[in-house]
Amino acid sequence: MDVNCDATRRRIGHSINVLVGLTLAMISLAQGAGAQTQSTDSRTTRVTSGTEAYQTLYLANLTQQNDMNDIQNDLRNMLPKAKLDLISPQNAISIRATPEDIQLAQKLLADLDRARKTYRITYTITDSDSGRRIGTQRVSLLVISGSKTQVKQGSKVPIMTGSYDAGTPTQNSQVQYQDVGLNIEASANGAANGVEVRTKIEQSSAAEEKSGMGPQDPVVRQTVLEVTSALAPGKPLLLGALDFPGSTRHQEIEIVAELVR
């Protein structure tokens, strides 16, 4: 009987030891798993918060240096923590920033880097004498919105500005050349219902009379028209008219703008 009681007590003690061991093991595993989970979450947050990416953003339409500088300044103002560098030869901007800032920069470039409109600006210069048309000159320019186009037609007139070694066999004269003829500058900016064009037309010619400063110095006659006008595509507009003093000559300048693309 005593033998049976001892055996029973040993079996109960062994079962208790096994149960305690299993419980301690489960508690240890749970603590280890919790510690591992906490460490992984902390590391992920730390990596995510400190992540920076690098990307090169290419400009497809804006190629002028001033335009690229303006876009770079806009990005710096909107993304003060981003590191930006302008790569002018490649028409590109490199950016080192968070993925969120890079996405914002891409959206901004998509809004700003758009193809500009191109206009054909045609000037018609009509000369008349005593009410009779004696000549018409037409000049057409292609102007991209936001830029300027210039055309010159004429010749260069020499003007003596001085001399050195005067009265000697090696006397030399200093000469400058002045452009005479027709000079047109046009710049365009797209508007809601058409295009705004800024025009500067300069006409000059050498007169027959000579300057009182010396027989070698010519007299240059000059007419300048500078005006900004709002144009509806395809509709001509009279920019100005001019009567020449001491004569019956009359001149009119007309402009028309057409959207090319």
Image (cartoon, rainbow, N blue to C red):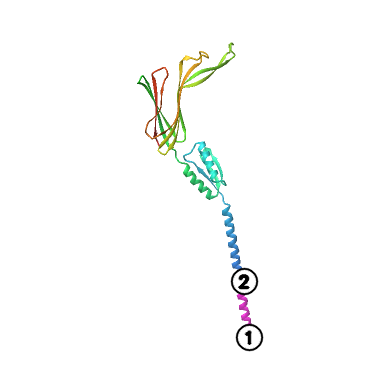
Residue 118 painted magenta: no
Name the residue that disc number 2 marks: 24
Earlier in the chain: of badge 1 and badge 2, it is: 1
200 w.r.t. 29: above or below: above
Please name whichever residue, 235 or 113, is drawn nearer the observer in this view of the structure. 235
Q: Residues within 10 Å of mark 1 (few under 14, many from 20)?
A: few
Residue 206: numbered disc? none
| Point 60% across, 60% down: residue | 39
Binning the other alpha carbons within 10 Å of mark 2 as few (below 14), some (14 to 19) or many (20 upward) gives: few
Establish if 73 lies above or below 170: below
Would you say 106 lies left or right of 8 here?
left
Magenta-drawn segment:
9-25
Query: Residue 127 appears at what percent x and percent y?
Result: 38, 22
Q: Label 2 is placed on what type of residue?
A: Leu
Numbered disc 1: secondary structure: helix
Q: Name the residue under label 1.
A: 5
Q: Which residue lies most toward the left here?
A: 132
Residue 49 can be seen, yes or no: yes
Where residue 56 appears, as percent x and y from the top left, is: 52, 44
Does the magenta-highlighted stretch encompass residue 13?
A: yes
